[in-house]
Amino acid sequence: MNKLLTNHKVLGDERGQLIAIESGIHIPFEIKRVFYIYGTQPNVPRGQHSHNITKQYLIAVNGSCKVTLDDGVNKVTYVLDQPHIGLFQDAMVWGTMHDFSPDCVLLVLANEHYDDQDYIRSYDDFQKLISGELNG
Ligand code: TYD
């Protein structure tokens, strides 16, 4: 899962920095929803679920956090600590956001509207679904 990180071009000049992210160009889906997480607690992880069809793209636009992605085979922890680094989380990938810095603002772009039914919140269920996919 090493190609999930993108180092976006920073369009900076003497006035400051700017990063542009366009659907289908910089990220592999059409954006239907944007949410952001802030005011987190240092030792309190978030996420800890996967989605059936929702794909996400995560950027720590301020501060830092870690994101652990688990596709049922590989589990990799990514450090998001710069506003030009983005991480793609595909559907059917278990994701946990953790180790937030107090100033972290984690921006998440998603390809679907919010739907509680799209969540897989039990790791057991996730593993069963993944092993079903892997075995046929
Ligand atoms: P939750 O899924 O628990 O956040 P996390 O992914 O960090 O564990 O979401 C927190 C609350 O916000 C919960 O009541 C659902 C609601 N919510 C929305 O209404 N829309 C959204 O797009 C998201 C991500 C959450």
Image (tube, rainbow, N blue to C red):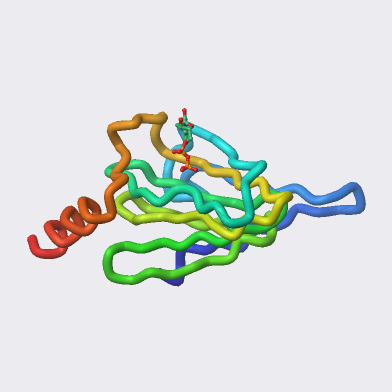
In the image, taking residue 105 as reference, residue 78 lies left or right, namely: left
What residue is shown at x 54% (from left), y 50% (from top)? 58
Q: Position of residue 54 (x, y in %)?
A: 36, 42
Residue toward you, 10 or 127: 127
Residue toward you, 54 or 38: 38
Residue 48 visible within the image: yes
What residue is shown at x 73% (from left), y 49% (from top)? 103
- Quadrant holding the N terminus: bottom left
Give the total number of marks visible in the rendering.
0
Q: Position of residue 18 (x, y in %)?
A: 75, 48
Quick one: which residue is furthest to the right in this view? 14
What residue is shown at x 61% (from left), y 61% (from top)? 80
Q: Position of residue 110 (x, y in %)?
A: 46, 40
Where 111 sits versus 93, above or below? above
Where 36 sits versus 136, above or below? above
In the image, taking residue 54 as reference, residue 99 lies left or right, namely: right
What residue is shown at x 28% (from left), y 70% (from top)? 73
Residue toward you, 54 or 21: 54
- Quadrant holding the C terminus: bottom left
Quick one: which residue is furthest to the front in this view? 43
In the image, taking residue 125 as reference, residue 17 lies left or right, namely: right
